[in-house]
Image: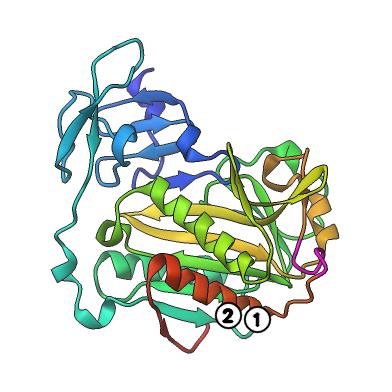
Amino acid sequence: MPSQQLRHRDPDFIPVNDDVAPRHRPLVGIDRDRIILMGVEFNHRAAAHAKELMHRDYCTPENDGDFHLDGFKIEGHDRPVMSVSTPYHGANMVSADLMQPEWVVAEQPVPYPEAVAAMEARVDAIAHHTDRERIWLLEHPPIYTAGTSARTEDLLEPRFPVFKTGRGGQYTYHGPGQRVAYVMLDLKRRRPDVRAYVHDLEEWLIRALAYFNVRGERRTGRVGIWVARGSREDKIAAIGVRVRRWVSYHGVSLNVDPDLTHFGGIVPCGISEHGVTSLHDLGLPISMPDADVALRKAFEEVFGSVTDSPGDL
């Protein structure tokens, strides 16, 4: 594959698709500083963990180290792929009062463009060690968002404003009754492994649902959390992630009590053979504050403690 075909318009970013699990992605190409999996691009400043990380000359990419060999076949070659465990020794660059993430709950719906602008500003600050990590819980007015792999034919009926977004995935709906959690974490300080991060987001949602005796489950090849309902299964939570300079943003959404008919204007996440559900649809009249309590408890179990921070932005 010619290297020019592997260029990304914004090589600082890693989109992780919502509709196909990154752990199952085939390799589709490499160039000097990055490896390309189907739908996921890593560059030398944001390298993947283990089997995803490779340099064209089979040596250590810049800023990474501690390699061991792990055999993997690349474009007809049998030479081994370098696996990596990348310890981060930059924690001392972050002042002690910035080490604990802040937990923010918006009191009013936040327009999508404002949310994206606020996330990008915070990501920049986290990357430069001038502000703390943030978990931001909010609701949006009714909208559709189109991820990096959204297909035009999956927008069936644009009932609400449609926003193109840099997160991975396809079309999804956000609106009142759905808890959106934007997660801005310094993955380089915590653990520079995108697959592990997505797995932890899934675990967070699974544990939060367990507080309401709901069994949320992973599905091979489909990121997100699913609920088995007899002969069918429905999606109750979605994941769409972007990583810039090893700082994550966008995040997850949990259906508490949205109007599920609003999902009918799209093919949610490009998956037409399965449905969408919510806590209320499952017969659980959970309030948003109760959902927030479960989300916080589960988050601290998976990612560690947080601190309260008032204010929407």
Residue at the image point whose x is 57% and y is 82% from the top: 106
Left or right of 61? Residue 139 is: right
Q: Mark 2 = which residue?
A: 293
Q: Position of residue 103 (x, y in %)?
A: 46, 79
Residue type at the position of mark 2: Val
Q: How many marks?
A: 2
Circles 1 and 2: CB distance less than 8 Å? yes
Q: Mark 1 = which residue?
A: 290
Crowd tier of the residue under label 2, counting other residues whose Cα lies within 10 Å: few below 14, some 14–19, many 20 or above = few
In magenta, the rendered stretch is: 278-283
* Quarter assignment of residue 148: top right
**Within the magenta stretch, is there residue 280?**
yes
**Within the magenta stretch, is there residue 204?**
no
* Quarter assignment of residue 300: bottom left
Residue at the image point whose x is 32% and y is 55% from the top: 246
Which residue reaches farthest top?
76
Q: Position of residue 85 (x, y in %)?
A: 22, 44
Residue type at the position of mark 1: Asp
